[in-house]
Amino acid sequence: MSTIEHLINIEEIFPAKINNKIYNDNDISSLASDIKRDGILEWFVISKDKVIISGHRRRLACLKLGIKKIPYRIFPILSTDPKFPELLVAFNNQRKKSADEIFREEVVRLNPEATYMNLLEYRIQQGRVNIEENVDVLPRKTRSKISAARQPFCEAVKKVFYKYKTFLPVTDRRVHYALLNDPPKTSIGKAGFAYGNNPKSYSALSRLLTVMRLQGIIPFEWMTDTTRPYEPNSFYMNVGGYVDEGILQKFDKGYWRNLTQSQPNFIQVVVEKMTVQGLVSGICQKYCVPMLVARGHSSIDARYAISKAFRQSGRDKLVLLILSDFDPSGETIAESFAQSMRDDFGIKNIVASKVALTYDQVQSFNLPFQADAKTTSPTYKNFVRKYGKGCWELEALEPAQLQALLDDAIQSALNLELFQAEVEKEKQESAELTAMKGQMKQFFLGLKREVDL
């Protein structure tokens, strides 16, 4: 771009606010001596709105010497332009800098929005299964093949997986409830029967899913068994692998800022069962809200841990968001949990809300009937008197419905302005981490060269 050269009164130009965040301009004694002896050798470069791009240290030196008129050039850009910070750094390429200044320059060069999107994408990818991925499966020796009579049942199951492709992996319970919306026949042969919400149908589905995975019709990775978690150990072949994969590759991706640290409320999600844990955890992570899988009515140890976390947070109010089945037991979880937190642990300012599954949701989503309430439940009579005998499990909700309900509930308990302010800070931090990663990479490469020598 072309530039224009002029003289201007030094009081008419302004330092860039971002300059002080990058550079330390306190020591200008030597520069002032040079200017007093030789004059101003390098012209000031300013933006169209008279903000300094190059010349911050020269400005301080001129003010110290009492110089009023200075030579300058206009660079055709406004200081409000998103490219301004990067331009400022470019004009300071020849400057002698400390390690801290070099790091802060790198942060400016990076786009916080882009680095933040990379961080979010990594978080999403950690829990995502690629539906197009081909995987190896076990040999087909010990299981019978799917007969022609069971092919329509198999196709109905495959449609469920493609319907839920953005929510993979799923549990067999999720597949079971999806089939209830449009029940197939388990076989077109004499032994076939219409799929229903009963042990016989569920058992037929479980057998079919096993064969489908062993024959490679669906990958093993598309399903999960939350009741039997498996945690593999992580090992590395050598130190180089540890540095590349364990440190550098994940250094700027594994950071989570506590986005609720400035909130007045301590929000705690309580889920009755592990089968929906995968759907719920992503929403909780999005808002940095802790989640407890209670597996029914939670233990006293879990409630103590929540009370301890609440007190350590220094928040004003405990907000409990409950997700449980719509049945006699599930209807009492929210009330009993809040009562225990109040009476057993002395938390007075507490609010408990059942996010799902409620009677109104059963009606509004037109969920298919599942089962009658168990007569052995202590609250059976009260439940039947109020709602009737029908019961529904959380899995009856579509995954997107369940996630939307929880998302809305968390947002209603948040101060969204404070939350967004924390998100903006995390964006800036993501750029800082990526800059640190670049410096670390250079450091480790230097060590490796020394070892190789």
Image (cartoon, rainbow, N blue to C red):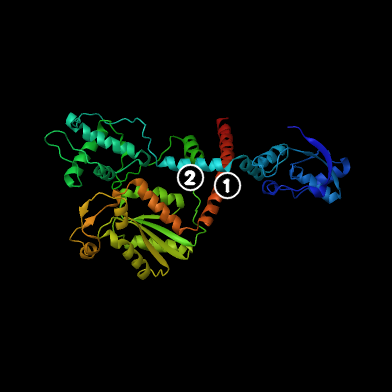
Of the 4 image quadrants, the one containing the C terminus is: top right
How far apart are labels 1 and 2 at the CA level? 15 Å
Sequence-wise first label, 1 or 2: 2
The residue at 25%/63% (across/down) is: 386
Kindly identify the amino acid type of the residue bearing the numbered disc 1: Gln
Q: Is residue 209 above or below residue 390?
A: above
**Which residue, given by chain and number where applicable, does mark 2 sit on?**
254
Q: Nearer the viewer, residue 25 or 79?
A: 79
Q: Can I make out residue 252 in this image?
A: no
The residue at 87%/44% (across/down) is: 36
Kindly identify the amino acid type of the residue bearing the numbered disc 2: Gly
Q: In the image, residue 52 lies at what x, y percent?
A: 75, 44
Q: In the image, residue 56 lies at what x, y percent?
A: 76, 45
Quarter of the figure with residue 178:
top left
How many C-alpha atoms fall within 10 Å of the one at disc 1: few (<14), some, or many (≥20)?
some
Q: Nearer the viewer, residue 436 or 166?
A: 166
Quarter of the figure with residue 310:
bottom left
The residue at 38%/52% (across/down) is: 405
Taking the image as shown, residue 421 lies to the left or right of residue 379, namely right
**Which residue, given by chain and number where applicable, does mark 1 sit on?**
428
